[in-house]
Image (cartoon, rainbow, N blue to C red):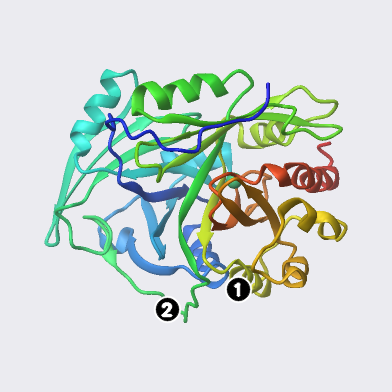
Amino acid sequence: MDTITKNKPDTHQDTFPINGTDYIEFYVGNAKQAAHYYQSAFGFQLIAYRGPETGTRDTASYVLQQGKIRFVLTSALSPGHEVAQHVLRHGDGVKVLALWVDDARDAFKKAVERGAKAAIEPQTLEDDHGQVTVASIHTYGETLHTFVERNQYKGAFMPGFQAKESLMKVEPIGLKYVDHCVGNVELGGMNKWVEFYQEVMGFKLLVTFDDKDISTKYTALMSKVVSNGNGFIKFPINEPAQGLKKSQIEEYLDYYRGAGVQHIAVATDDIIHTVDELRRRGVEFLYVPDTYYETVLERVGKINEDLLELKRLNILIDRDEEGYLLQIFTKPVQDRPTVFYEIIQREGARSFGKGNFKALFEAIEREQELRGTL
Ligand code: FE2
């Protein structure tokens, strides 16, 4: 089977309206230090905080923002806490992919009626700035989707949090919005979770990649991308495929101890500036050999950017029927080889960089070899 792409969003009635990504929450070992990394390296502004000083005794959370992207970093203050247990098992990782909706109670009710497993019943939180209603369901692994209804709220983030500004001078790097969030699931899990998003949340199957699309000499994976009604939410779901050696997905599943978020793609309008800054600030990227740039323009045609600049920064290029895209992948951002980032600039293209899969997976394999997992 070849790649199947359905690029046009379905204009039929949206059975599960979602406005966009509300926030992404990470459970981490040391939220205070992680918050510094996202401020100093990625240029996020600190906007809110919740912890002992604000009346929450058992956790500390830092809310960071750049463009429309909001990250929450949470640590536990005691070993028995659910957040500490999550970090012990998974390492630092994504716990919540929160979705902004107009009616969180209705979203939760519909999702559960259609087969989602309830995680946290709807509750309305209130402070001087208004009301936020939240409710959560389970998705793959121990990951949650939290529905957030915030039309009646004017505060920094959510009731319970206090507005807090960065103590350091933060220089944003041009990150705009979450383009897509990728989940890695166990062998046989991909279709189950694709069906979940289709049946429970009204998502559409956007594209299918099989192991012929995504394989190198040694490793393979399969992937399907689902997207919500307005097309703002895109969730590729990967599962390992049979290869000669351990795939990057199996390595992730081993280290994460199960299914979870593999990478978050964040969009920029100026990837050269964004990546230049990230490199200057010490963020590590996967390495693609210079030979990639000898033939890439034959494959992708004319682009507006200076190829020498792209080569200097090791940025990858791909094209589809609608335009081209520029992308690059960081190394994992914690010691376990689990979560990493993709930086993406879309110049018309709505695809995911299929033309770069081979170069990319060979780059990952070089890292796996260094880790002794290939
Ligand atoms: Fe991606």
Q: Is residue 288 visible?
A: no
Q: Residue placed at 85% from the left, 43% from the top?
A: 369
Q: Secondary structure at mark 1?
A: helix
Task: Tell me if 201 is positioned left or right of 210 in this view.
Answer: left
Q: Which residue is mark 1?
A: 273
* Separation of marks 1 and 2 at Cα, in angstroms: 24 Å
Q: Residue at x 40, y 46 (%)?
A: 232
> Which three-letter amino acid code belongs to the residue tagged 1?
His
Q: Position of residue 205 (x, y in %)?
A: 48, 28
| Mark 2 crowd level (few <14, some 14–19, many ≥20, 10 Å Cα) | few
Q: Residue furthest bottom?
A: 169
Vertical relation: 176 (above or below) 167: above
Label of residue 259 in the image: none
Q: Residue at 84% across / 41% down in the picture?
A: 372
Foreground residue among 128 and 290:
290
Q: Quadrant of residue 73?
A: bottom left
176 with respect to 259 (left or right): left
> Picture quarter containing residue 37?
bottom right
Image quarter of the C terminus: top right
Which residue is denoted by mark 2 in the rendering? 167
Tell me, yes or no, if residue 305 can be seen here.
Answer: yes
Q: Looking at the picture, does residue 373 appear above or below residue 334?
A: above
Tell me which amino acid carries mark 2: Leu
In this rendering, the label closer to the viewer, 1 or 2: 1
Which residue is at 76% across, 22% downward?
A: 242
- Please provide percent x and percent y for residue 6: 51, 33
- Secondary structure beneath disc 2? loop
The percent position of residue 187, horizontal first and vertical second, equals: 64, 21
Q: From what the image shows, is residue 121 above or below residue 326?
A: above
- Going from N to C along the chain, the mark reached first, 1 or 2, is 2
